Amino acid sequence: MRDQGHRKGLYRLAVLAAVWGVILIKWGAVVTTENAGMAFPDWPLSNGSVNPEGWLEVWPLFLEHGHRILGAGMGVLSILLVAWAWFSKSSRLVLGLTIAALAAVILQGVMGGIRVLRISDGCAIFHGVFAQVFFCLLLLIVMATAPGWPEGNRLYPAERISGLRGRTLLLLGAVGVQLFLGAGARHLHRTGLVATDYPTMNGAWLPSLEYPEVAFHFLHRWWAFAVLAAAVGCVEFLRRPGDERAFRRTAATALVLIVAQMLFGIGVVLMGTAESKNLWVTTLHVLNGLAVLAAAFVLCVQSMRAVPRGPLLAGSGETKRRDGKGVPEAAA
């Protein structure tokens, strides 16, 4: 009972860390939209102080220093995850994931600091993309510590399992590319938009791609349709009778979120100007993008954990039971 309590405690801590990660990413999105990332020229201190004077009264200082405080809190939570996993004698998988999360949050903090000290757009793009990768790692820890994880392998027709995994990997990869393009579009042109019309860009269907910020913006717009096509492919593949409902629900959720994300993206363009972006729509676009990534990632994990299932035994109305507990048995 004590071990079970420890596992539940680790799961709850992992959920807290994931929620904290959402808040941190949302806060970081506001920092970028408001162009407050360089509010302090130094790091890890802020104007040479742990608690800089006047940071609560000045909006850019509040955003940037608040972001640093939230990042430090994420570091503390990551240390607690490792300690809890170690002392509760969790599985090697869970312990390894928590150690990876701690290493990732340290790397993320260092890259954020280098971005400030060197004023590097490349580091800013890496910092933005890696935050999403880190969130996926937190999400995997939540899944691996959830009560149903050990028995959570779902059966799937053996002849179709490679197709399922291929489509979910394609969707996750397409979403990853879109996140990179979005980060480039945001960080290479933080003060506003390179184009405020849609579907054309400054009146042209194919603008000059000489400048990186224009190229990133253009590719980000149109790659969205590749992501949409990948999601439709997953939903279509899972339409057959007998397919696992959990897979279908996750795929359908991803598709709905992607459509919403495209609409939010159009809203960012039409409601922004060359000098600034609409704060609320842009923040919703970032958060919904995180939800798209989460849905694609969960679907991919579900497919990778699926167990091949053979055909039903001839003459039987249902699959035989392996151990009398209701687990279908693959045909020999």
Image (tube, rainbow, N blue to C red):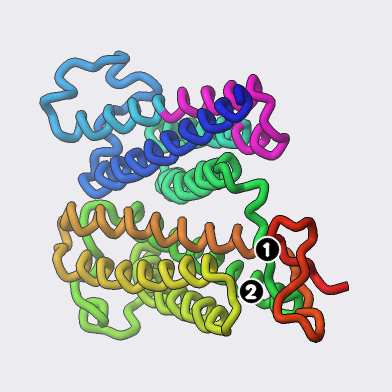
Q: Is residue 111 placed above or below 239 in the rendered structure? A: above
Q: Find numbered disc 2 in the image and state the secondary structure of the residue it sits on.
A: helix
- Which residue: 36% across, 67% down? 257
Are dots 1 and 2 in contact, CB under 8 Å?
A: yes
Task: Find disc 1 in the rendering and name its residue.
Answer: 306
Task: Find disc 2 in the rendering and name its residue.
Answer: 164
- What's the residue type where badge 2 is placed? Leu
CA distance for labels 1 and 2: 10 Å
First in sequence: mark 1 vs mark 2: 2
- Nearest to the eye among marks 1 and 2: give it: 1
Quadrant including the C terminus = bottom right
Q: Find numbered disc 1 in the image and state the secondary structure of the residue it sits on.
A: loop
Report if residue 304 is visible in the image.
no
Q: Where does the magenta region start and end? A: 74-98
Residue 36, quarter of picture = top left
Residue 164, quarter of picture = bottom right
